[in-house]
Image (cartoon, helix red, strand yellow):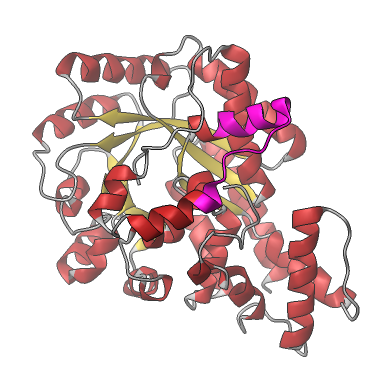
Amino acid sequence: MTSGQGSSCEHGFVSFVQGPLSLILSSAFRPAGTSSSRLLSCWLWSRRSASFGDGFNPDGVDPVDVKWRAKLTALPKADLHLHQEAHRCLDRILARREGRAAFDWAAWRRHFMETVPPGPQRLRLIGSVKPVPLADDDDEMFVARFAELLEYEGAAGATYVEVRCGGDTILKDGFMDLFRRAERQAQERYPRLRAEALAIVMMGMPPEWIREIADACIRTRSEGLAGVDFLYEPYLSEADWTPIYALAERFAGVGLGITAHAGEMTPANIAAAARTPGLTRIGHGIYAAAEPALMDLLIERQITLECALTCNTFLGAVPSLAEHPLPRLVETGVKVTLATDNPIQVGTTIEGEYAAAASLGVTAGQLAQITRTAIQAGFTTPDRRSELLAELDAYVNDALR
């Protein structure tokens, strides 16, 4: 998706409410000898505690169940496809400061799904609501916005996050210094969290704008910018990738990671994206599952897909979560990761995405491998990658042995 507050199971629409429950009751995660009813009790307790913070504990919760759920929660998670949600994060900050309720995204989701047909129309209108303007976005508020988003991710168990910054964000003076300040602020609450910044290059903009953004990306690489994400028009039919290829060569030449949106609602542009110089990932790309030749191409070129299950279903890219092609992609050998896309707006968390994948039959071991794939495909430093992999190995050795 190009552009809610709640727990990981509160997606704002019925088809997702069962996601985390399916994770807890899945045989892949259930400890031997533990009944579904007792795990359900633990799940209810954990959700109530997360929502109200009141230590609510229903009768009959076995400490062993709680301990097991803690292992599930401890699974390191990575989110490689996360938009900065600038307006939404700012609204949450201002709501707290002003003593008011934040924008009701759950109500908006219900209305949106009732009034906008699934598919291209939802994709076109998804970014049309901005609860507050970004006027007077000084350095302190800029840092606060990114810290808000990173803390949202950290609270859901993310240990590695990449944030996509669109518009003129990359042009802000001291952008990477401010981003690192936000990261450090989030790490005060979530010490395991690491974050990197990506810039969105929108190819449909005027040429002079594209040049300015591209030059800023190259200049900011030396300051820590991790990568770029290409967006373009037409998105749902084959586009001309010639200018993208030329820019990609420049970006790859300075060591920027490259990803691109493609294959979200049609197979269009997947093959062209896969041939982009330096590109190692594709945002969404799920329609490759409909064409074996496209899956073969992705496997041949070792390209990783960034799959956002909740967003795909919310927009109507797939008819339902149960029909999402993630299992087919995994079984075929395509590299995949899980992602939230615009989590506040669509009402998900990275924990919720892992839970949704589990409800599709993805096993505990496969979920750990998905995190490993994300870390290996991430646009981060070798030192950070090694640290993240070591933490994941420690989890696997403890929880999955």
Quadrant for the C terminus in the image: bottom right
Residue visible at 44% across and 25% down in the picture: 225
Which residue is situated farthest in the top direction here?
173
Residue visible at 63% across and 74% down in the picture: 21
The answer, for residue 398, to whether it is visible in the render is no
Magenta run includes residue 94: yes
Relative side of 36 to 299, left or right:
right
- Locate residue 169, reporting x and y percent: 42, 21
Query: Is 242 in front, or is 131?
Result: 131
Q: Is residue 141 above or below residue 396?
A: above
Span colored in magenta: 89-107
Q: Is residue 208 above or below residue 115?
A: above
Relative side of 16 to 268, left or right:
right
Q: Main secondary structure of the magenta part?
A: helix
Query: Is 362 in front, or is 347?
Result: 347
Query: Is 327 in front, or is 208?
Result: 208
Q: Residue 172: which quarter of the image?
A: top left
Magenta run includes residue 96: yes
Q: Is residue 20 above or below residue 186?
A: below
Residue visible at 34% across and 15% down in the picture: 216
Residue visible at 39% across and 63% down in the picture: 313
